[in-house]
Amino acid sequence: MKKINADKIVWLILLILSIFLVLFPIYIMFKYSISDRRSWITGGEYPVPWWPFKPTLEMYKYYLGDKRFWSNGWLSLKIALLTVSFSLILGTPAAYSLARFKFNGKAFLLFLILAIRFYPDISSVIPVSYIFNKSFLYNLPNEIKISLAHCLLSLPYIIFIAQGVFETIPVDLEEQALILGTSRFYAFLRIVLPIAAPGLAAGAIYSFLLSWNEFVFSYFITATSVSSEVPLPVYLKTLLGSFSPNLVSISTLSLLVSIPVIIFTFIVQKYMIAGMIKGAVK
Amino acid sequence: MAELKLMNINKRYPNGFHAVKDLNIYVSDGEFLSLVGPSGCGKSTTLRMIAGLEDISEGELYIGNRLSNDIPAKDRGIAMVFQSYALFPHMTVEANITFGLKIKKVPEKIRKEKLNWVLELLDLKGLENRKPAELSGGQRQRVALGRALVLDPDVLLLDEPLSNLDAKLRVKMRTELKRIHKKLKSTIIYVTHDQAEAMTLSDRIAVMKDGKLMQIGTPSEIYNNPANKFVAGFVGSPAMNFISGELKLIDNKNYFVFEMGKIELPELLKEKIKESIKGKDVVLGIRPEDIEISFEKDNNSLTGVTSIRETLGSDDYVTVEMGNILLTVRVEPEKFIPMDEKCYLKLKGNKMHLFNKDED
């Protein structure tokens, strides 16, 4: 038998502990989502059980048959994908310039890019909702308005992540491409981007999550909108206190909301192959 | 294939650093020229200016007969191999090698032919579908070379292409490069800080220091007639011995006089003595192989004490102390030399060099 050393046991315990910490709230949510009425309204007569007396998929059936859920979900998905696209399209060239070109005031610029994140979202929502409600932008469809607002939050991260990624890619590769006959743009497209893809994928996952779960901006922008469709987090909020049995309802919806995130992450993770740059130099 | 002309080339960076100063070099068609010098001497900057990766601040660059200062890198008819190889990691060997041909829209049939030719030439057959990460250092190096060669460049630029290889592979690739040059007769500019590489590979060598060209000539010219103390010390291993002293005229004969003795200078150096050095402090230079060691007193020899013997296999080197001055002397491997013994050194008259002390 292999020798078991104390080190390994400590690591194992820590690993189990952290998995437990992450999964426990999900377990609670899941438990409530499949609870029958007697399992969560106890009236103090008996403790809430660790597993429902009579598990039921009632709420899942309800939501999967609910038109509002699907239309709001579709809106959320559009917003998240648009946010990812906008922030990559805007952020990648910005990050590339920051990584490759020397110019004055670079540090200050980086500082400014982060500026929106200096405040809690609940403070920055004031100018943001002002911009989207009081200007010509008001007439844009909700998914565009909200995804643009989400870009404000995700761009700083995308730019920082992508800049770091570009800096790890040797300039030699681009110079070689230039000598071999490409334009600077083509070299960026064919050489730099594919190599940067894993890093950019991490940024994409991050902005997808950020947008998908974002509440404050979405709430204030949709509040003045004529459309009744709202992103899922806002929808979730409208259910608080307006629906009974609400604990079960919210747990179910929350779990349903997480499914696209898991799917998106799995798709994008394919690109996150480590060691992409290996073999390029030396 | 083409000739290359650098006329009064200067490179000044925006921060004021003057990296290359009034460089004049003519490289004839099919010539293998090495740019050597210590790091920071401007050799890589020069190469990058030829490649079109750096702007030329002043001067004119002709590739073929075309003034090329403002021609973009891709239209200069050059190809370059970087020190880092700069292989595209997400592409196969084949895609790497044919990348430039694809960009130039060469038809697929010709692309295939060239690919096969280069795979054959560089012994890369069977590796077409590998990614760079799956190659050894030597293979990567050859892929990088292949990617440049398929373009049939007028001028091939090599920036320390062997410096990332281990010693054994480096010597092998050196021979390989020489073979390829002989076969293709391409004009090659080769940047290296390794003087041995430059000596073995080149038709001519340009030695640079602090952005200035110190000397340009064939390896034997550079080795046997170094223009100054810097070149003399840079080329050759082990390095040339230097002794500081002054010139004196005694009984109508020229003598080199230093703290540990004096030595009569041969007629051969007469012109040089007259020219510039007379009356100034000078440095006498002599290569390790141009000193004979003996234990019997001789006229016009120096006295020292043997101290260390180093064996390199084909040659042995003995360090001889003369006070604070250490001289390296080559001896035959078989020859017995007692250590810590008084000895006499005879310098080969026709191999002595005199340098101005103040200039490099």
Image (cartoon, coloured by chain):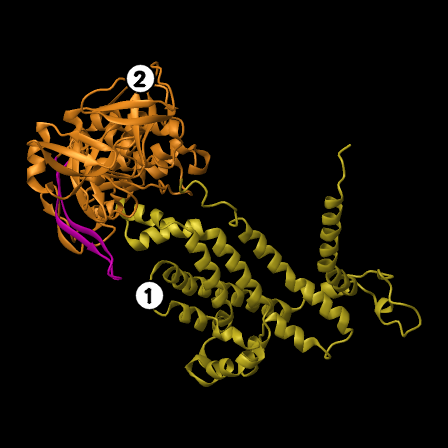
Chain colours: A yellow, B orange
Query: Would residue A140 appear left or right of A187 to someone viewing this image?
Result: right
Is B170 situated above or below A91? above
SS for tag 2? loop
Q: What type is the residue that disc 2 sits on? A: Glu
Q: Is residue B263 visible?
A: yes
User: Do callouts 1 and 2 mark residues in contact (Cβ within 8 Å)?
Assistant: no
Label 1 – label 2 distance at C-alpha: 60 Å
SS for tag 1? loop
Q: Nearer the viewer, residue B276 or B187?
A: B276
Could you say where residue A201 lies in the image, as x and y percent from the top left? 50, 55
Question: Which labelled disc corresponds to residue A103?
Answer: 1
Q: Residue B292: say if magenta.
A: no
- Type of secondary structure dominating the magenta stretch: strand
Q: Nearer the viewer, residue B328 or B147?
A: B328
Q: Chain of mark 1?
A: A
* Residue sticking out furthest to the right: A45
For the point 24% across and 19% down, which residue is it? Answer: B297
**Boundaries of the magenta span:** B1-28
The residue to which callout 2 is attached is B332
Dividing the picture into quarters, in which one does residue B38 lie?
top left
